[in-house]
Image (tube, rainbow, N blue to C red):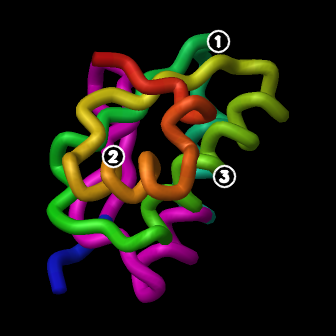
Amino acid sequence: MSGASIRLAPGGELLLAGVLDYRSGPALREAGGKLIGQHAAAALSLNCAAVEKSSSVGLALLLAFMRDAQAAGKSLVVRELPTDMREIAQVCGLTELLPLQA
């Protein structure tokens, strides 16, 4: 299993990386919520290009991060969603809910 992480890049973009599953989900949930709350910008971007593999936990994280941003009065867009996450979102009917940016 690859280590999963969420961090703030120097340009202010949130970077989600690694394997998103039931083992990594709780720590990512906590860390992502803190980063979103502490970020000074009103508009946030979450880049998922470095996500190696994801179960439905990955989508649950995205939805939780959306709620965190909304609660903090911020907007959030998701960039570079991997194919496996996009396919799960389509099957679950979540593509309309996710703020995906090409």
* Quadrant containing the C terminus in the rendered view: top left
Q: Nearer the viewer, mark 1 or mark 2?
A: 2
Q: Earlier in the sequence, mark 1 or mark 2?
A: 1
> In the rendered structure, which segment of residues is drawn in magenta?
5-29
- Please report the residue visible at 47 percent of the width from the left and 84 percent of the height from the top: 22
Q: Is-magenta flag for residue 65?
A: no
* Quadrant containing the N terminus in the rendered view: bottom left
- Do the residues under discs 3 and 2 have CB atoms within 8 angstroms? no
Query: Taking 101 as reference, is 64 above or below it?
Result: below
- Please report the residue visible at 32 percent of the width from the left and 28 percent of the height from the top: 79
**Residue 13 drawn at (x, y percent):** 36, 26
Q: Is-magenta flag for residue 27?
A: yes
**Residue 55 drawn at (x, y percent):** 37, 72
Q: Nearer the viewer, residue 23 or 27?
A: 23
Residue wearing tag 2 = 86
Write down the quadrant of residue 38 in the picture.
Answer: top right
Please state if 7 lies on the left or on the right of 64 as rendered. Answer: left
- Please report the residue visible at 61 percent of the width from the left and 45 percent of the height from the top: 65
Query: Taking 19 as reference, is 69 above or below it?
Result: above
Q: Nearer the viewer, mark 1 or mark 3?
A: 3
Residue wearing tag 3 = 64
Residue wearing tag 1 = 42
Q: Residues within 10 Å of mark 3 (few under 14, many from 20)?
A: some
